[in-house]
Amino acid sequence: MTGPISHRVESYLREQLGRGPIHFTLIDPEKSPGPLAAAVASEAVAAGSHAILLGGSTGITPEGMGAAAAAVKAAVRVPVVIFPEGPGSLAGEADAVLFMSLLNSRRLDLVVRAHAHAAPLVRRLGLEPIPLGYLVVAPGMRVGEVGQVDVLPRNDPAPAVGYALAAEYLGMRFVYLEAGSGAPAPVPAPIVGAVREALSIPVIVGGGIRSAADAASLLDAGAHALVTGTIAEKEGIGPAFREIVREVNRRRAG
Ligand code: 1GP
């Protein structure tokens, strides 16, 4: 499918963000294939999550992504967005893709070149690209290693603010502060606060969010959106997941 770029998912996100912070549930289609992904997604949305991200591991095929996206779309009414590992994880069954540049990587392909391969495919598949600056904060975990990232320090907000502002000035419409999936602790709240204060685009925060207390401190610092993956992978949509999502929804109007 070609033609004008859709902004449906971005409009949905902006409309939701107009009422307060939002929560993304990240599901890895390799660990949770089709029907399982759909079951997790419908419980997550029933618990109050606002959108589903599909991705997270390095071995995802277009078939695996397509099957998960189709199953999740049939199960929930919220947008289904690919959190890509590379052009190989794209599938037209999803609604959109985080079209992200890993700005603090030493790998030029992750900063921009993979995008030149992916963009025509994104267009052909009819996926909505959501332009996003992806910034990895220490410890960075696997994405920090594989992505050959100069991780942003945890004790000094200035480098994170510099990169995040650069993302905004380059025209990206979201910034994602990532501590790495499974990180022992989330991005420090003072970093989130400093980035939020400097930027006028939404700030998404993920990696290592395990409890309502983690969520509360990031939301108090000004995070617009939280992403959780590991917690549902380990415990399903259990009490910790529900409390995190409740913490987000408590701050929303209406
Ligand atoms: C990873 O930010 C996401 O890219 C989610 O991290 O798996 O630690 O929740 P967790």
Image: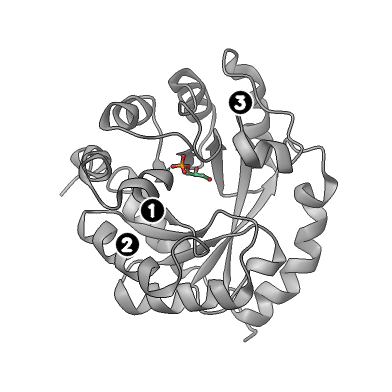
Residue beneath the point at 65% across and 56% down: 58
Q: Are marks 1 and 2 in contact (CB under 8 Å)?
A: yes
Q: Which residue is mark 3?
A: 138
Instruction: Answer with the quarter of the image where residue 215 lies.
Output: top left
Residue type at tag 3: Ala
Question: Disc 2 to disc 3, how far (Cα)?
Answer: 29 Å
Front label number (1 vs 2): 2
- Residue 25 shows which numbered tag? 1
Label 1 SS: strand
Amino acid type at circle 1 is: Thr
In what element is the residue under mark 3? loop
Please state which of residues 92 and 28 is positioned toward the viewer in this rendering: 28
Q: Using the rendered view, name the quadrant where residue 251 is placed.
A: top left
Pointer 2: what residue?
A: 40
From the viewer's perspective, tell me whether residue 63 is left or right of residue 40. Answer: right
Of labels 3 and 1, earlier in sequence is 1
Query: Relative to 63, is 80 above or below?
Result: above
Q: How far separated are the C-alphas under marks 3 and 1?
A: 22 Å
Q: 10 Å neighbourhood of mark 2: few (<14), some, or many (≥20)?
A: many
In the rendered image, residue 166, in percent from the top left (x then y), is placed at 69, 35
